[in-house]
Image (cartoon, rainbow, N blue to C red):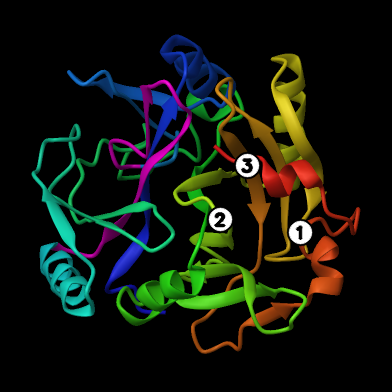
Amino acid sequence: MAMTGVLRPGHVAIRVLDLEEGINHYKNVLGLIETGRDKQGRVYFKTWDERDHNSVIIREADQAGIDFFAFKVADKATLDKLDADLNAYGVKTERIPAGEMLETGERVRFEIPSGHQIELYADKTDVGNGMAYVNPDPWTQDAERGIAPIRLDHCLLYGPDIEKVQDIFVNVLGFYLVEHVVLEDGETDLGIWLSCSTKAHDIAFVRHPEPGKLHHISFLLDSWEKVLRAADIMSMNKVSIDIGPTRHGITRGTTIYAFDPSGNRFETFCGGYQSYPDWKPIKWTWDEVGAGIFYHDRALNERFLSVVS
């Protein structure tokens, strides 16, 4: 797949109830690298193998949840084109000036029908991954601190009108549908998994009456053994684990779900198949949705379905 438009997930901004608890969790337990703090009180992080300055931003607030989720695009011309395409579709956009976020260029922000704020941007400072661009080593010491994910991989968002969301992502932003779950009527989608790359998903949505809710943000690990190691680290640090280690039927990824100290769910994820935009989407029917979500248990976890931030 020629990646000439939207490249990949770029950053997520989330709210935590206690900033110092949040910093300890994301820095020492999850093992992210702190890259800066700004005058607004936001703290910036990246994974050890990401090269851009930041991918996770936290701020203290009275309610946990998500502020916005962003995608990096190929260049400034692509950013301008997608901004114009969104406006032509009827989506109102806002230009956030360069520098409003540390080391990040101009951003285009818009609200989608599920009630979430989505951003696009083209420029972010390359701070590297601690290894040389010529004859590098395979990993750094940061790769062994905490859970130490490779990258921010995707997110799952809960809200209404997901068919309208899908239309924007597919017909304006160039994503494609990889998998979906249908309700008992056999037609209405409960959930959709969308990709802008060759990953099984870069963002997903589940139908939910309340708008703007976060189900989880996901971090990629490079092996099933690392997922099991993540479970050990979570238990050592008394992290509240939701479910896992287990496997998804949908995307075929291996996974653990847990909560940060503020109740924001996060996932440590590995695997999943490679996908292509010419492939026919995979459909999961309501009678097999348990296996779709948790393939080993083949049953739904009510907390997993209903607890959001």
Residue with the mark numbered 1 = 293
Q: Secondary structure at mark 1?
A: helix
Q: Amino acid at mark 2?
A: Pro
Q: Amino acid at mark 3?
A: Glu
Can you say which quadrant of the picture contains the C terminus?
Answer: top right
Please say whether residue 48 is one of the residues in the magenta stretch.
Answer: no
Residue range in magenta is 51-75
Residue 109 higher or lower than 233, as above or below: below
Query: What is the spatial separation of the Cα atoms under label 1 and label 3, in whole angstroms?
Result: 13 Å
Residue at the image point whose x is 48% and y is 20% from the top: 27
Residue with the mark numbered 2 = 209
Residue with the mark numbered 3 = 267
Q: Nearer the viewer, mark 3 or mark 2?
A: 2
Question: Which is more toward the observer, 64 or 138?
Answer: 64
Q: Residues within 10 Å of mark 2 (few under 14, many from 20)?
A: few
N-terminal-most mark, 1 or 3: 3
Dividing the picture into quadrants, the one containing residue 264 is top right
Left or right of 86, for residue 219: right
State whether residue 196 appears in this view: no
- The residue positioned farthest toward the front in the image shown: 209
